[in-house]
Image (cartoon, rainbow, N blue to C red):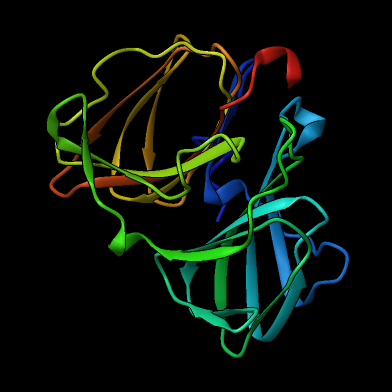
Amino acid sequence: MQNLGYTRSSHQRDHFLLTPDTFVRAPLPGMIHATAIVHVGPITGARFTQYTVEMDARGRFATGPLQTFLWVLEGTVQVRETRLTPGQYAYLPEAEAITSDQPARVAVIEKPYVSVGEPLPTAFCGDERQVEAKPLMDDEALEVRTLLPADTTFDFAVNTMTFQPGASLPLVEIHIMEHGLLMLEGEGIYRLNDHWYPVKAGDFIYMAPYCPQWFCALGKKSAKYLIYKDWNRHPISS
């Protein structure tokens, strides 16, 4: 229900915040019993695409010809011979069919591969619960789980970051990497450039290169987000 044109969503020169009340759904080619919420893509200046797929029972979609990262938000999906449940994920170097026999939601990140003379990494599936949590800069209240191997065959990274109530990033970051960020749990305050935004689970944030950024978790439970960044490549190759 719209409340006199109010929304927390905001679109700025070097960042934007998209909240669920402003999401628009539209099917992408090849989707059956499924629809997509496209959060960011090349038309915005980003060098990657991120969207959420909402699948009905007997839903089906195919990833594009680009390398793809999938994260299951709700329900169960089938990727090749593997069934993935919430918190599980897959890296796919080429097009694959994704199916579900029940309602499901999946976060999808696609990016053209930037080669350094090596073949694309091979496909694999993972489970965040089996990934070691490491403190960020020795802060035990801020845990990072690295979901893709940290080697130069991968030209992007996807992590989860979990903040205990009151925990924050240790500095205002300004860097060449761009980000796609999906809030998974909790709430907090995000500084983006000179803007301050209340954010919560379900929100999406895009941060362009060199956008000043900082986050602090608020409330009585932890905050957690899934975050993409491009890395491991010389800037001129991008």
The image position of residue 19, as x and y in percent, is 52, 44
The image position of residue 11, as x and y in percent, is 63, 25
Assign the C terminus to one quadrant of the image. top right
Q: Is residue 11 above or below residue 111?
A: above
Please state if 123 lies on the left or on the right of 112 as rendered: left
Q: Is residue 204 above or below residue 98?
A: above
Q: Nearer the viewer, residue 102 or 110?
A: 110
Assign the N terminus to one quadrant of the image. bottom right
Q: Nearer the viewer, residue 85 or 15?
A: 85
Q: How many marks?
A: 0
Taking the spot 77% from the left edge, 40% from the top edge, the residue there is 112
Q: Nearer the viewer, residue 108 or 148?
A: 148
Q: Nearer the viewer, residue 113 or 101?
A: 113
Give the quadrant of residue 153. top right
Give the residue furthest to the front.
117
Taking the spot 43% from the left edge, 50% from the top edge, the residue there is 147
Q: Is residue 75 above or below residue 192?
A: below
Taking the spot 70% from the left edge, 37% from the top edge, the residue there is 48
Taking the spot 70% from the left edge, 82% from the top edge, the residue there is 59
The image position of residue 68, as x and y in percent, is 67, 54
Q: Is residue 234 above or below residue 185?
A: above
The image position of residue 211, as x and y in percent, is 53, 14
